Image: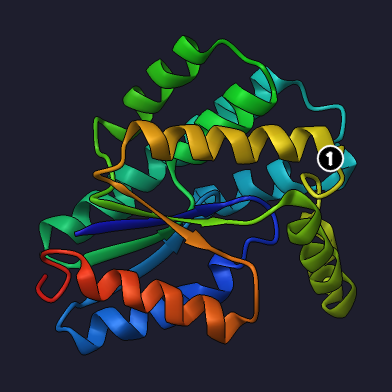
Amino acid sequence: MFITLEGIEGAGKTTQLPRLVAFLEEHGHTCVVTREPGGTAIGQKVRSLLLDPDNSDMSPETELFLYAADRAQHVRRMIEPALAEGKTVVCDRFADATEVYQGWARGLDMELVQVLNRVATGGRKPDITLLFDLPPEAGLKRAWQRIAQNGKEAADCRFENEKMAFHDRVRQGYLDLARREPGRFVVIDALGSAAEVADRMIAVLERLPGIDRP
């Protein structure tokens, strides 16, 4: 099984990921936890380029191709081998993020974005995508609090520095994807405490068919 977590900056998906993995392991899944960008050794180097706020002059096209390169390596060296071994892969962001960030928010040609995603993923799509949704104002407030509390994260804040209109478009892009693929997406209200959001997530997971077996 392949499960992805998506959401705007500060949505709390990274906070909820360990809770998700614990739930899955309690239900018999052997989990491989990964992320994009940066799920491989090569991907870590790509991630440093993509998220460094000093790279504010990066063109949208450069950004798109870097994400595609990271994803191609990730799918072939991490995700597909783990799935072939019968493991459950849990990934913090995947191809949906590129469609909304580079397509919806950056305004790049959506057909180009989708073609590159298909090439990079080899056609692999998640079985379940958990979309943690909340207003951008609330998400960015959380994100900047995290950055202030944990100095090492300050080097990864290029997207937090974008204008509010950018984050509004990202959210709308995600919600549009969820409307178009209701069989794959589960939208979770991400407002409230981490414990409250975790309870909502687990309640949803308990109702999904097949979640209790690898």
Residue 84 drawn at (x, y percent): 12, 56
Residue that appears at 32% across and 44% down: 75
Sort mark 1 into few (<14), some (14-19) or many (20+) by Cα contacts within 10 Å: few
Tell me if I can see residue 168 in this picture: yes
Colour pattern: rainbow
> Image quarter for residue 154?
bottom right
Is 121 placed above or below 22 here? above
Is 6 placed above or below 124 here? below
Is 85 placed above or below 50 here? below
Left or right: residue 60 versus residue 120 is right
Q: Nearer the viewer, residue 164 or 42?
A: 164
Q: Quadrant of the N terminus?
A: bottom left
Residue 160 drawn at (x, y percent): 81, 50
Q: Nearer the viewer, residue 79 or 29?
A: 29
Residue that appears at 52% across and 39% down: 174
Left or right: residue 26 versus residue 22 is left
> Image quarter for residue 204?
bottom left
Residue 110 drawn at (x, y percent): 51, 14
Q: Nearer the viewer, residue 27 or 59?
A: 27
Q: Quadrant of the C terminus?
A: bottom left
Left or right: residue 163 versus residue 189 is right
User: Residue type at mark 1?
Assistant: Met
Tell me if I can see residue 40 in this picture: no
Residue that appears at 37% across and 30% down: 120
| Number of marks drawn | 1
Element type where label 1 sits in the image: helix
Residue that appears at 36% across and 31% down: 180
Q: Nearer the viewer, residue 47 or 179?
A: 179
Q: Which residue is mark 1?
A: 164
